[in-house]
Image (cartoon, helix red, strand yellow):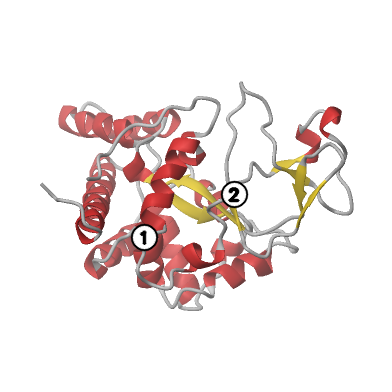
Amino acid sequence: MFKNKKIKSNGFEPDSSIEAWKHYKKYYLESNSEFSIRKNYNFKNLHFYTYYTKLNRGCGEKFDGYNYANLKIASNVANRLYALHNSAERKTNNCNVEWCCATRRVGGECDFNFNEEKCKLFQKLIGENEEALLQLKKCKEMHHTLLNFSLMEAMGSMQGFKGSNKFDRFDLFIYELDRYFQKSSEAVLSKSSSSNKSGLEDYLSSFKNIYEYCHEVYFIESEQLIDKIIKNGSLSIETCDDVIRYMNLAEMFWGEKEFAFLKKRVSNGGRLF
C-alpha cells in the first residue's frame, strides 16, 4: 500500500535520490500502457551523469566525446541519479569508469515548488491571513515528499524553463506545455540549446496531448483537473487569494496522485484497506 513520506537528502537531491528512484520504479514500471518512459529508458542501471569538469583527474579524462561519468561528485554535494535513454552510448575507460555521450535521460523533479525561498515569496503575498499561512505551512511540508516527485526529461532543460518563473509554477508549466501540444507556442523549448532541442522535441512527440502527458508522467487521469491546472496557469499570482487558489490546486493534484497510486497497488494484488 502506498504511503507518502518525506525524503531526506543524504548526499542526493531528494527527488533524484536512491529512495526516490525506488518509488519511481515501483509506479512508472507498473504502467499497463506502452508508456514512453517505461519503454524507452533504462531503469535498471541508473547513472550519475556527472560532467567531466566536476570530477577529479584521478577518475580519468573524458574521451571521444564521452563527457559524462557514472560517478558521484562528492559525498557532501547533492548528487542526482538518472535513467538514460536506451540509445545512450556508453564506454568504460582504463580506470574502469563508465562514461557516456550527451543523451536523453529522465530524472526526478519536484512538481509544486514550496521550498523555503518560494514560501517566503508566498508569505509576502499572504500577509497576516492566518488560515492561508497554515495552509502554506502544510504545502511546505509536502515539498520533498513522494507525492510531489515526478520524472522529467532532462535533455532540453524543461526544468530550466519551469524554474525560470519566480515561483517555479507547476500550473504555468502545464499551461505552456498544453500550448506546445496545440502548436501555439514553443516556450517550453526556450531553455534548450541548439544541440539538445531536437531530443526534447522527440521526447514530447511520444505524447498525443497534454492529457496523455499528465496521465503518464503525473498519473492524473481527471481531464477536469488537468483543465483546471491549465486555466490556473494562465492566471497571475499577485494577491493572497491567488496564492490560496494555487495551494488548493496543489492539494487537489496530490490527492488525485495519491488515489492513483492506491489504485495501482490494488490492481496489482495489494489491498486498499
Mark 2 = which residue? 45
- Please say whether residue 11 is visible from this viewpoint: yes
Residue 167 in view (yes/no): no
* Viewport quadrant of the N terminus: top left
Mark 2 to mark 1 CA distance (whole Å): 17 Å
The residue labelled by disc 1 is: 30
Give coordinates of residue 208: x percent, y percent.
44, 78
Report the side of 112 relative to 243 (left or right).
right
Closer to the camera in the image, 132 or 33: 33
Label 1 secondary element: loop
Report whether 147 appears left or right of 1: right
Q: Residue at x 38, y 72 (%)?
A: 33
Q: Amino acid at mark 1?
A: Glu
- Which image quadrant is residue 196 in? bottom right
Percent of width and height locating residue 180: 50, 71
Residue drawn at x 39%, y 45% is: 23
Identity, as a three-letter code, of the amino acid under mark 2: Asn
Dot 1, how many residues are within 10 Å of its Cα: few (below 14), some (14-19), or many (20+)? some
Q: Which mark is residue 85?
A: none
Local packing at callout 2 (Cα closer than 10 Å; few below 14, some 14-19, many 20+) is few
State how many labels appear.
2
- Label whose residue precedes the other's in the sequence (2 or 1): 1
